[in-house]
Image: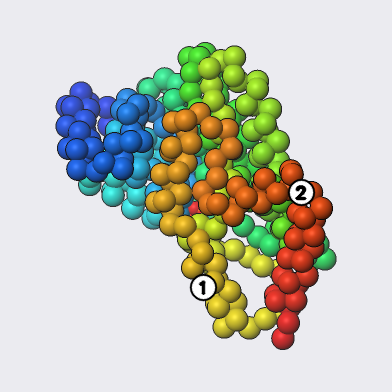
Amino acid sequence: MHFVSSIISNHSASGRSNQYGNVSAFLRRNTEIIMTTTYLPNKKCLLTGAASGIGKAMALLLAESGAELFLIDINANGLQETVELIRGKNGKVNAYKVFSITDFEQVKLFAEEIHALYGAMDIVMNIAGISAWGAVDKMGHEEWSNIIDINLKGPIHIIESFVPKMMQQQKGHVVNVSSAAGLFGLPWHGAYSASKYGLRGLSDVLRHDLKRYNIHTHLVCPGAVDTDLVNSIKISGLTISEKKLQTLKTRFQKHAVKPEQAAKTILKGIEKNEYLIFTSFDVRFGYWMQRKFTFLYEWAMQKMNDYFQKTLTEK
Ligand SMILES: NC(=O)c1ccc[n+]([C@@H]2O[C@H](COP(=O)([O-])OP(=O)(O)OC[C@H]3O[C@@H](n4cnc5c(N)ncnc54)[C@H](O)[C@@H]3O)[C@@H](O)[C@H]2O)c1
């Protein structure tokens, strides 16, 4: 695959003072943000998946909070749009690059380039991801591999390339965006859950391994968030009409939170050094139920599975 790549550096002292002047004005205007932005100016934040959805909303929120951004996405147009939006509001994007996080050499190179210019990151956020569902006999090998490569190996590449430098600096935050599917055995989610449970396992280890380096690990388990993911999702084995699928998507979007809301909740969780961050109550409640009333969790999962199977395969 050919990757269009672009790195733009913007490190002038005048840029900094302009930026913080604007950030102060923004903070005065927006009391909700004031509560969540006391420590972000000067913080260097690396985000994957910044072209769309949660990653884009997170990048905008961090920029409004005074952070200096380093952005990655495979979607060139989307990433360019995010960068222009941020810079249009006098936010600071120090560097951005278009490539796939599955390409370890590209991740390593980008890390070397920005470490040489800016030093270690303060916050590293693994947000990029894809979704694909399907019963075991319906999903192709390529789909299984793709989802593990992007959702699990991608974040590993980022962690390998950026966290050692943070360990030297003895501070920081690693934020891994998993999913409700990283906590529960949801129907037709085999491949997706394998990747998201994997990320959860990795986070659980880092949480303890990195504590002595004053690095906080955060595992984000969103429920439904109204992003493009609902349109890009691949579902193998569907037999229902496009119209019925659209009705289901609309139902999902109705109970989903907006990506901007999810980004605010994630930022609050980071500031409070929370390990598990939920963006919706249903996932928090489900996780509590899973641990306290296992039989209820198992019953609910089977009911959901039967409903899912029936709904997605009925003519
Ligand atoms: N939207 C939801 O309901 C929901 C729920 C739970 C978890 N999540 C997780 O949240 C994260 C963000 O998802 P979103 O809903 O914002 O989706 P989205 O599709 O809006 O954004 C995902 C971004 O990741 C980028 N990306 C995909 N593959 C990439 C690759 N190989 N290299 C670099 N970038 C790549 C895409 O281009 C896109 O910009 C994902 O990890 C997803 O699994 C989303």
Left/right of residue 249 with respect to residue 66 in the rendered view: right
Farthest-out residue, bottom? 315
Q: Position of residue 146 (x, y in %)?
A: 67, 52
Q: Is residue 87 above or below residue 113?
A: below
Instruction: Check disc 2 and report the residue beneath it.
Output: 293
Instruction: Check disc 1 and report the residue beneath it.
Output: 250
Q: Position of residue 128 (x, y in %)?
A: 53, 47
Closer to the camera, 152 or 20?
20
Q: Residue 264's image quarter?
A: top left
Q: Is residue 264 above or below residue 249?
A: above
Instruction: Give the residue type at disc 1.
Output: Thr
Q: Residue 23's image quarter?
A: top left
Residue at the spot 58% in from the left edge and 74% down from the top edge: 248
Q: Position of residue 87 (x, y in %)?
A: 25, 43
| Residue 127 visible in this rendered orientation of the protein | yes
Residue at the spot 63% in from the left edge and 83% down from the top edge: 241
Residue at the spot 55% in from the left edge and 58% down from the top edge: 224
SS for dot 1? helix
